[in-house]
Image (tube, rainbow, N blue to C red):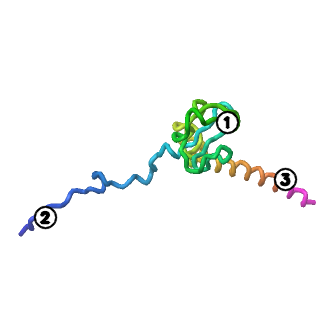
Amino acid sequence: MSEEPLEPQAPDTESTGPSAPIDAAGPVDDPDTHRFECRSCGFVYDPGEGVKKLGIVPGTPFSALDPVGFRCPVCRSPTKAFKDIGPRNKPSGFEENLGYGLGVNQLTPGQKNVLIFGGFALAIAFFLSLYSLR
């Protein structure tokens, strides 16, 4: 039996090197994309939309706003009254509760609205279809 000499192999840099790809399961959480909610009135500042009324262009993160000059456009509260509520596509609710509720807890607020109001529309359609029976 003759054994071939093993060639030195380059270390696997895909999983350990500095240029490792970002894990697709969890996107990088960029604080500049987070939305902020006014605790006084419920106004939500979304950096993707900006505030046209105040001349804030879309794409302006909350951290770039002037803490002295910026006020809530609804109730005039200062920036200290705003709370970070996370990015737009983040599921609503507490992190420890996302595994419960038959998967409904992992839906975004918009998806929950579609599910709720779609169910109402379907129930109304079924109720109105009873009039077609004799």
Q: Quadrant of residue 7?
A: bottom left
Start-end of magenta stretch: 127-134
| Left or right: 41 as drawn, with respect to 65 | right
Q: Marks 1/2: CA distance?
A: 64 Å
Q: Marks 2/3: CA distance?
A: 75 Å
| Residue 131 location (% of width, % of height) | 90, 57
Q: Are marks 1 and 2 in contact (CB under 8 Å)?
A: no
Could you tell me the amino acid type at mark 1? Gly
Q: Is residue 1 visible?
A: no
**Magenta region includes residue 132:** yes
- Which numbered dot is residue 7? 2
Identify the secondary structure beneath mark 2.
Answer: loop
Q: Quadrant of residue 42?
A: top right
- Which numbered dot is residue 127? 3
Residue name at image x 64 percent, y 41 percent: 44
Pick the front one: 13 or 105: 13
Say which label, 2 or 3, has the lower sequence index.
2
Q: Nearer the viewer, mark 1 or mark 3?
A: 1
Could you tell me the amino acid type at mark 3? Phe
Q: Marks 1/3: CA distance?
A: 35 Å
Could you tell me the amino acid type at mark 2? Glu
- Quarter of the figure with the C terminus: bottom right
Q: Which residue is mark 1?
A: 42
